[in-house]
Image (cartoon, helix red, strand yellow):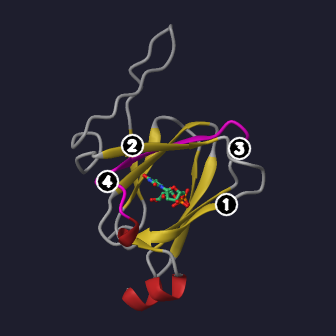
Amino acid sequence: MNLVTMIELPNLGDDRGGLAVIESGLSIPFDIKRTYYIYDTKEGVSRGYHAHRALKQAVFCISGSCDILLDDGLGEKIVRLKSPLEGVFVRPFVWHEMHNFSDNCVLLVLASDYYDESDYIRNYEEFKGLI
Ligand code: T46
């Protein structure tokens, strides 16, 4: 399975400005149950450092930019998210870390399920053992 699956959104904007639409199950490959956003990140801070057992997520940087590292236990890739029209699909059992947040970064995350701490694998050695 591909480690990196990008999600491209059409720009429905016009001379008034940009407009991007995300429709559950259409623009992204799952039904959305939860949405959250990460904003006002502090300089030099990294986040993530976990994988999910079942959760599917789509991550869009709707303002600014940041790097997301994806690791499926066999290899890793770093994707620079820098456009509100381009997101990345994070499937279950992919370790992910977010680094190099720009000042104005807002990371929008669409998730396939409600928050459940028991779905997180927060220890890298445990993650490697499960792969
Ligand atoms: C992910 C990346 C991209 C909740 O109570 N409900 C929620 O829906 C979320 C997302 C978090 N929380 C709590 C859990 C922690 O006590 O908020 C606290 C901070 O969460 P965490 O340290 O997991 O944040 P990140 O930025 O490391 O990870 C988040 C998501 O948690 C995670 O699922 O994939 O963004």
Q: CA distance from mark 1 to mark 4?
A: 23 Å
Q: Amino acid at mark 1?
A: Ser
- Identify the residue at horizontal 46%, vertical 41% (top origin): 86
User: Marks 2 and 3, Cα distance to the nearest angstrom?
Assistant: 21 Å
Q: Which mark is residue 35?
A: 2
The boundaries of the magenta stretch are: 103-116
Nearer the observer, disc 4 or disc 3?
4
Closer to us: 14 or 122 = 122
| 85 lies left or right of 34 | right
Picture quadrant of residue 99: bottom right
The residue identified by callout 3 is 102
* Amino acid type, mark 3: Ser
Q: Nearer the viewer, mark 2 or mark 3?
A: 2
Q: Are marks 1 and 4 in contact (CB under 8 Å)?
A: no
Q: Is residue 111 magenta?
A: yes
| Residue in the picture at 38% in, 87% down | 130
Between marks 3 and 1 in the image, the one whose residue lies nearer the viewer: 1
Nearest to viewer (mark 1 / mark 4): 4
Residue 108 circle label: none
In the rendered structure, find residue 114 and report the number of the disc placed on it: 4
Query: As shown in the figure, which amino acid type bears the numbered disc 2?
Result: Thr
- The 10 Å Cα crowd at callout 1, few under 14, some 14 to 19, many 20 or more, is some
Q: Residues within 10 Å of mark 4 (few under 14, many from 20)?
A: few
- Tags 4 and 2 in contact by the CB under 8 Å rule? no
Quadrant occupied by the C terminus? bottom left
